[in-house]
Amino acid sequence: METLLLTVDEFVDNSENYTQAVDLLNNGEVVAFPTETVYGLGAVATDEQAVKKIFTAKGRPSDNPLIVHIGTIEEVEDYAVDIPEVAKKCMEAFWPGPLTLVMNVKPNVLAASVTPGMQTVGLRMPDHPVALNLLKVLKKPLAAPSANRSGKPSPTKAIHVFEDLQGIIPCILDGGMTGIGVESTVLDVTLDQPVILRPGGVTKEMLEQVIGSVLEPNFEQQKIESTPKAPGMKYTHYAPDAPVYLIDQDKNQIECAVEKLQQQQHKVALLAPQKFDDVNADYFFSFGDEHELEQMSGKLYDALRACDKTDATIILATVTERKGVGTAIMNRLEKAAGGNWYQQ
Ligand code: TXA
Ligand code: MG
């Protein structure tokens, strides 16, 4: 299968490219498109055969539910029931935006594979002109997980999607680099107290200002059986080929680590803020300005993917404080590292 890479930007008339994408979707095909978080691989969420193609293309376990993307808040009632007050407040405050709300699913509307054996559905209205325009022209909901092969970091550039799914999917809408760079916050609002199943761009602090106390289990608590989690969290995620070790943003410690590892014949890739570019690592991938967490989240997956193109045998990644989007960054870094820290 040939994979079309269609550029959609604000400077030219892209209506033909949208028409092509919408025709494919209406014919039961999958199309990759940018959102403000990461690229998604979409199919019409009411079309079972089309939704199944998402799982095949990604190599995704069939018991992992998909997020349904909608173009307006009004559509929520078409797919969810018992919509709680906190959900409405969240939609008003954060939609369109990087927040997925898990609510009770309306039976027999969405394709069964979207919510495999579940009573709930994750809904989100994305904040990206391309995603919103696609939904507006299509006038149907889009089931869309991140557009990577399962086990790879989520794509933040169209080329990442192309590398993973070339020849497997018919079309990618290229809207440039995504902004936030980590996936949406997944908030379960079906429980007495809302629980963050996956941290993202809408932070605990931001949510609590609107709906009061919210639970956010940490990496260790997530391992406990009774902690509510997103089904997808049990699968290994985001891991590059070489093992990743976390390290503090401490120049001296990083320099010692690199030297010691190189003495052990390792090729070391260092992922760190720009100011560490003079450390003598074999490869350096910048997280940008050390004080700009948004730069770090935006560059994280690109940097992890870049490591796979090198012959690095070990990856050192600097950590950040767990504040604001730093919580989401640390969540993804801890996964990539399997919780391992570099130890002298
Ligand atoms: O930013 C994002 O959320 C991106 C863009 C494309 O929108 N999408 C995304 O989808 O990251 P995916 O499939 O890669 O991750 C969705 C996560 C999975 O961990 C899944 O288990 C969880 O959300 N999830 C989906 N529906 C759920 C539900 N009903 N209950 C609990 N968790 C759910
Ligand atoms: Mg994903």
Image (cartoon, rainbow, N blue to C red):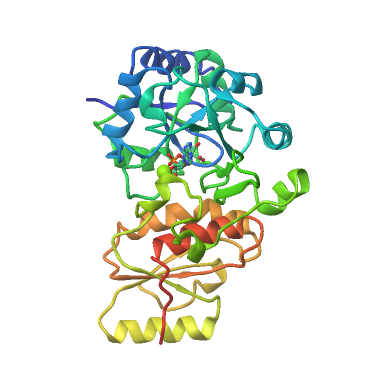
Res 4 → quadrant: top left
Residue under the image location 70 percent in, 47 percent down: 207
**Residue 295 position within the rendered picture, expressed as x and y whole percent measured from the top left:** 58, 55
Of 257 and 199, nearer the camera is: 199
- Location of the N terminus (image quadrant): top left
**Residue 209 position within the rendered picture, expressed as x and y whole percent measured from the top left:** 77, 48
Determine the quadrant in which ligand 2 lies: top left
Give the left or right position of residue 185, taking residue 238 as reference: right
Residue under the image location 39 percent in, 21 percent down: 111
The answer to whether one can see residue 206 in this image is yes
- Location of the C terminus (image quadrant): bottom left
Of 236 and 336, nearer the camera is: 236
Residue under the image location 30 percent in, 26 percent down: 52
Count of residue discs: 0
Decide: is 49 above or below 96: above
Give the left or right position of residue 45, taking residue 163 as reference: right
**Residue 83 position within the rendered picture, expressed as x and y whole percent measured from the top left:** 64, 28
Residue under the image location 56 percent in, 51 percent down: 199
**Residue 179 position within the rendered picture, expressed as x and y whole percent measured from the top left:** 57, 43
The answer to whether one can see residue 200 in this image is no
Res 280 → quadrant: bottom left
